[in-house]
Amino acid sequence: MVGTEWASDAVLYQIYPQSFADGDGDGVGDFAGLTERLEYLQWLGVDAVWLNPCFASPFGDAGYDVADFLTTAPRYGTPEDLAKFTDAARRVGIRVLLDLVAGHTSDRHPWFVRSAADPDDHRYVWADRPAPGYVASPGSRPGWYRPNFFDFQPALNFGYARTDPAEPWRQPVDAEGPRANRAALREIMAHWFGLGVSGFRVDMASSLVKDDPGFVETGRLWRETRAWMDAHHPDRVILAEWGDPARSVPMGFHGDFFLQFGGPTEGGALRSLWNNGAGTVHEEWPDEPCYFDAEGRGSMRPFLAEWERAAKAAAGHGFASLPTANHDFSRLACGPRTREQLAAAFAFQLTWPTVPAIYYGDEIGMRFVPGLPDTEGSVLGPRYNRAGSRTPMQWDATADAGFSSAPAESFYLPLDPSPDRPDVASQRADEASLLHQVRELIALRRAHPGLGPHAPVEVLHSGYPLAYLRGERYLVVVNPRRTPACLPVERELPGRLLHGRGVSLTHSVLRAEGFSYAVFIR
């Protein structure tokens, strides 16, 4: 971790670039808008931002269908505009990470166009006969290709861990095509490192080597990539979209996220915290209450069990990151959850020993907007429309929310239509707002390393309220339910209030009002 300590101490902020800030007035966010809003990110206190894909793309899957890894999509600006943003961000202490789509391309990428015309090209996985899930060749080449997600996202060939004479397209990981793709992966990363990018979040990081029980070959690929980075780019990082830090971090990633999928519980840890069934919902997810629920029907046990597993496996190797939401999953402010409930969620996220990742707009309580049209592949199921988490950032109380000077019909997605939608300007002017509470919690974490990722944690009570010690000096209490909760005090606890509201502590009892939180110091 030498040279990358900054990542484990970071407060990460995820930006969906087409929805954050429009600098050129076409209704779509861009690099110019990002640069204009750097002052806000600096004021908020985050020190690393992750941008969703901004490479050239036909945008069938919101940029995750890449047509050229070495240039930017014109709607965002030029590579020079991106470099200007990364330079300006670094000057104010903010590092920039990009989204690396490592396992596939768009079917319009020149690599695939050539491959679809040349039977001797092995950059992608091609079968000589129909196979389940494979797609017929769109070019003169006979055969069928393997997609990685949508049909228009052909899987790059990183080889198969297990070959089979009956399926000759299962090339070994050291075949010519897989070797070329591993080399290209490093070329792409080095290119953007040269333009000031501090790292990557790797999309579908587990998907590269196919039929890989235990991810043995996948792990070898990423450990080799990490060794190359440590030798040539020692201050840069790679974060996984794997959803299983206990597995991915020992495989070479600096960090991984708890996600709505992944790991032995298929995302149960994250969903047990935030998912109230009112936003993006996969039909196979069990209908269970989450802990941050106003009725107080949830349990912290699923998250704590998975966090303990991750913390043990990742210790000394890297870290787990806990997001408020992401571009594929419901925002915190979703369905019946109101903004008054959110400060308790942030108090937990920003004092638990993980790297916090704030999804843009969650810090002001932007809500998940239901009922939006399918936009750039946003719909994944009957109740799973990701567009609701991708609406324009709400900067002020004007009609266009300060997002863009374009007509509303030109916006990438419609604004939240609620007349009381929150916005940055109003909350910056109100010191009692959620935004100020989040900013204060970030500053608190920065000022007190004992609240960060490295100090130990001891859970005193995992019900309502949640109470835990950070090291020897700090007590954190969170009550996300509507009704008050109390605990008997059976030992001496840190008792001087450092930050919070609605929690009192005496020698015999700890009382937490509804939707309250507090941090005490010894």
Image: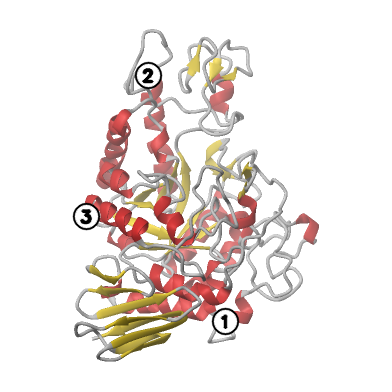
Image-quadrant location for residue 344: bottom left
Name the residue beneath numbered marker 3.
Answer: 315
Q: Amino acid at mark 1?
A: Arg
The one of 387 and 91 positioned closer to us in this rendering: 387
Drawn side of residue 498 relative to residue 99, left or right: left
Disc 2 from disc 3: Cα separation:
36 Å
Name the residue beneath numbered marker 1.
Answer: 428
User: Could you tell me if the residues under marks 2 and 3 are in contact, i.e. CB atoms within 8 Å?
Assistant: no
Q: Amino acid at mark 3?
A: Ala
Which residue is at 39% across, 62% downward? 299
First reached walking from the N terminus: tag 2 or tag 3: 2
Task: Point out the image quarter for the N terminus.
Answer: bottom left
Which residue is at 63% across, 63% downward? 21
Q: Position of residue 73 (x, y in %)?
A: 61, 45
User: Could you tell me if the residues under marks 1 and 3 are in contact, i.e. CB atoms within 8 Å?
Assistant: no
Disc 1 from disc 3: Cα separation:
38 Å
Image position of 242 with respect to 338: above or below = above
Q: Please tell me whether mark 1 or mark 3 is closer to you in this view.
A: 3
Residue 176's disc is 2
First reached walking from the N terminus: tag 2 or tag 1: 2
Q: Please tell me whether mark 2 or mark 3 is closer to you in this view.
A: 3
Disc 1, SS: helix
User: Could you tell me if the residues under marks 2 and 1 are in contact, i.e. CB atoms within 8 Å?
Assistant: no
Disc 3, SS: loop
Image position of 151 with respect to 163: above or below = below
The answer to whether any part of residue 49 appears in the image is: yes
Which residue is at 68% across, 55% downward? 28
